[in-house]
């Protein structure tokens, strides 16, 4: 007889369904980051407070911070604060470098693929940022117009899905001439994510 052993590999991704709004505790440049060979280097560390995402968190786990997949490097369960390192590429591609203590961010824990997914698969690898150029109300919905570079806009299509600051959303309109797209937030979502708190001129991941 032949014995067959099946190995199951667990793959985690994000869904774009924000679990909570967290708060930035600090964003600082440190010169004591220990590298692989024991030497020290300079790097950027972000500390965030969030109660829900700390449930089950462990060193090395992935937490999505406003759309960016980041690795937890320190955990403080007493204060519900976790720390992550921001690589130079992360600072170039996202708006995380503009955050200040007290800033609100969207937070989500990684989900196991194969489970329930009420959003869409979100890798947490941000392609770039867009700038809010207009906001308006349509009955109980909030519409937001975002300007993005043509290099990103060519991948955005009407009624396609997109992750905005880590939130799974549907694209409404795309203007490839004026380089903008729009999306809307229903009344429930408006109260659960940070996007409505942002003003015209601010950036979105």
Image: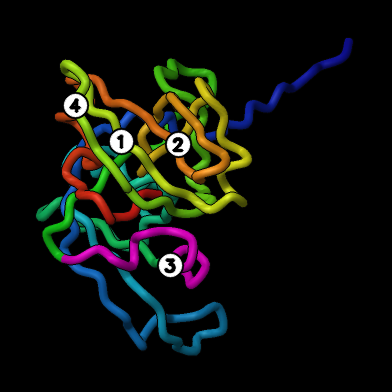
Q: Which residue is denoted by mark 4 in the rendering?
A: 137
- Mark 1, residue position: 144
Indicate yes or no whether the magenta region holds residue 88: yes
Is residue 62 placed above or below 89 in the rendered structure?
above
Main SS of residues in magenta: helix
Give the residue displayed 61% in from the left and 38% down from the top: 155
Marker disc for residue 29:
none
For marks 1 and 3, give the CA distance. Answer: 24 Å
N-term-proximal mark, 4 vs 1: 4
Q: How many residues crowd mark 2 within 10 Å: few (<14), some (14–19), many (20+)?
A: many
Task: Residue 91: give its label.
Answer: 3
- Residue at left offset 40%, top offset 49%: 205
Q: Residue at x 62, y 31 (%)?
A: 9
In this picture, residue 8 sits left or right of residue 15: right
First reached walking from the N terminus: tag 3 or tag 2: 3
Q: What are the residue bounds of the magenta stretch?
A: 87-100
């Amino acid at each position: 007889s032949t014995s067959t052993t099946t190995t199951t590999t667990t793959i985690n991704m994000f869904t774009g369904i924000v679990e909570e709004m967290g708060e930035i505790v600090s964003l600082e440049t440190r010169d004591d980051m220990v590298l692989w060979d024991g030497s020290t280097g300079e790097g950027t560390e972000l500390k965030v407070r969030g109660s829900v995402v700390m449930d089950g968190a462990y060193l090395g786990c992935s937490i999505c911070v406003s759309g960016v997949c980041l690795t937890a490097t320190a955990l403080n369960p007493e204060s519900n604060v976790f720390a992550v390192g921001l690589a130079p590429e992360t600072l170039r591609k996202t708006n995380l470098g503009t955050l200040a203590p007290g800033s609100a961010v969207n937070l989500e824990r990684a989900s196991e693929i194969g489970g329930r997914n009420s959003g869409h698969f979100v890798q947490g690898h941000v392609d770039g940022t867009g700038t809010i150029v207009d906001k308006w109300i349509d009955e109980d919905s909030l519409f937001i117009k975002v300007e993005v570079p043509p290099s990103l806009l060519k991948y955005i299509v009407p009624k396609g899905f997109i992750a905005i600051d880590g939130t799974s959303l549907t694209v409404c309109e795309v203007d490839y001439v004026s380089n903008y797209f729009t999306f809307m937030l229903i009344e429930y979502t408006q109260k659960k994510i940070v996007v409505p708190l942002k003003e015209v001129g601010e950036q979105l991941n």
